[in-house]
Image (cartoon, rainbow, N blue to C red):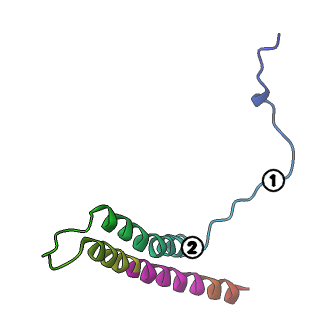
Amino acid sequence: MSTQSSNDTAQTGRPVYLEPTAPGFWTTLCGAVLAVLAPLFGFLIGSTMGTGETDSVINPLFMGLFIGVIIGGVGVAIALLGGVRLYRASQNKQGDN
């Protein structure tokens, strides 16, 4: 029996070079996800709160959806800022060549 494990031997092959993502990529992605999911979760939370009282000024469904749309708008702004960073990074990269 050998006491040497298979992890001790070096594997040969093509080297792997990891490149970082462009500045603004994760900001754009997170902003887009927030913009899409916030109104859906607002509608979900508003509908789980029920219909509310008949004499209430604001319906809970409306309030949940409204807050979700506001948060979704913030997500759109974040995605746009990330897109601007992506665009500027691509312009700087092209200018270096």
- Residue drawn 29% across the image and 77% down it: 62
- Residue drawn 66% across the image and 83% down it: 93
Q: Residues within 10 Å of mark 2 (few under 14, many from 20)?
A: some
**Residue 2 tag number:** none
At which x and y percent is residue 38?
41, 71
- Helix, strand or loop status at disc 1: loop
Which quadrant does the N terminus fall into? top right
At which x and y percent is residue 59?
23, 75
Please, which residue is most extreme toward the left here? 55
Magenta run includes residue 84: yes
- Is 37 positioned to the left or the right of 2 in the image? left
- Is 46 positioned to the left or the right of 25 in the image? left
Is the residue 45 above or below the residue 85 in the image?
above
| Magenta stretch: dominant secondary structure | helix
Is the residue 67 above or below the residue 17 in the image?
below
Name the quadrant containing residue 8: top right
Q: Amino acid at mark 2?
A: Phe
Q: Residues within 10 Å of mark 1 (few under 14, many from 20)?
A: few
Name the quadrant containing residue 56: bottom left
- Residue drawn 43% across the image and 70% down it: 40
Foreground: 92 or 73?
73
Q: Find the distance from the CA under tag 2 to the CA under tag 1.
A: 25 Å
Is the residue 45 above or below the residue 24 in the image?
above
Magenta run includes residue 19: no
Circle 1 sits on which residue?
15
Span of residues in magenta: 73-88
Q: Amino acid at mark 1?
A: Pro
At which x and y percent is residue 47?
33, 66
At which x and y percent is residue 50?
27, 64
Circle 2 sits on which residue?
25
- Helix, strand or loop status at disc 2: helix
